[in-house]
Amino acid sequence: MEQLNLKKSGFTLIETLAVVGILGLVVVTSVSIFFLTLKSKRKSSSLTDIKQSGDYVLSIMSQMMRNAKQVSGACTTGDPGMSSIDILNPDGQTTTFTCQGHSLGCLSALSPASERIASNSALPRLDCLTADDVKLSNCGFSCDNSQSGKPTVITIKFTLEKGDISDILGYASHSFQTTVSLRNY
């Protein structure tokens, strides 16, 4: 009698389903990691934009204030509560830094009512110091000129935000604060 060869090569149904299931998990995990990386890149990019904009604003204001002859107008000490500050430049011109840039014509693409830090140091042109795509909040100035024989100290404080707060992975916020002593007192 002839013997039947029952040995067949190939995979069973259970082996095939196991491999498909494992591959499915690998694909889903890979896609999740990819999208999380994209969102993290967006947040990182927003934070970089905010820091660059804030550092630029602080460097411009610090340099001009440091070289100013004096603070024009009243000085408010304590927590930065003034929304604008006037300084007298070495050339005799007055420069105003304000947290309410829209009042000087510095409008934001985000919203016409959005605040931006602005300066009138380049009149007739107005300088909008903060970037167009960031939101400004908690902005203020204070100064202390109460000690005679000592330079006036100006405190600058503000927060910049970018993105929608409901999108945690796309939202970024950073607070900035510095003090500047006038050299020419």
Image (cartoon, grey):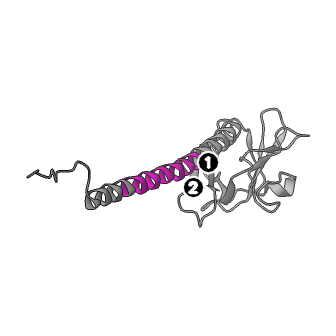
Q: Are marks 2 and 1 in contact (CB under 8 Å)?
A: yes
Going by the image, does 167 lie left or right of 117?
Answer: left
Q: Is residue 90 magenta?
A: no
Which quarter of the rendering shows the C terminus? top right
Residue lying at 65% horizontally and 40% vertically, measured from the top left? 56
What stretch of residues is rendered in magenta? 25-47
Residue 125 sits above or below residue 170 on the image: above
Residue with the most extreme right position: 124
**Residue 114 shows in the view:** yes
- Percent position of residue 47, x then y: 56, 49
Up the image or down, 166 lies above or below 58; here it is below
> Tag 2: residue type?
Ala
- Given the current orientation, which residue lies at the most extreme left position? 1
Q: Which mark is residue 172?
A: 2
**Residue, far front:** 1
Position of residue 177 in the picture relative to residue 91 (left or right): left
| Label 2, residues with CA under 10 Å away: few <14, some 14-19, many ≥20 | many
Numbered tag placed on residue 50 in the rendering:
1
Answer few, some or many: residues within 10 Å of disc 1's Cα (few below 14, many 20 plus, some between 14 and 19).
many
Q: Residue furthest bottom?
A: 166
The answer to whether residue 150 of the structure is visible from this angle is no
Percent of width and height locating residue 160: 63, 54
x 79%, y 60%: residue: 111
Compare residues 164 and 3 and report the one nearer the observer: 3
Secondary structure found at label 1:
helix
Quadrant of res 93: top right
- Of the two numbered discs 2 and 1 on the same chain, state the one appearing first in sequence: 1
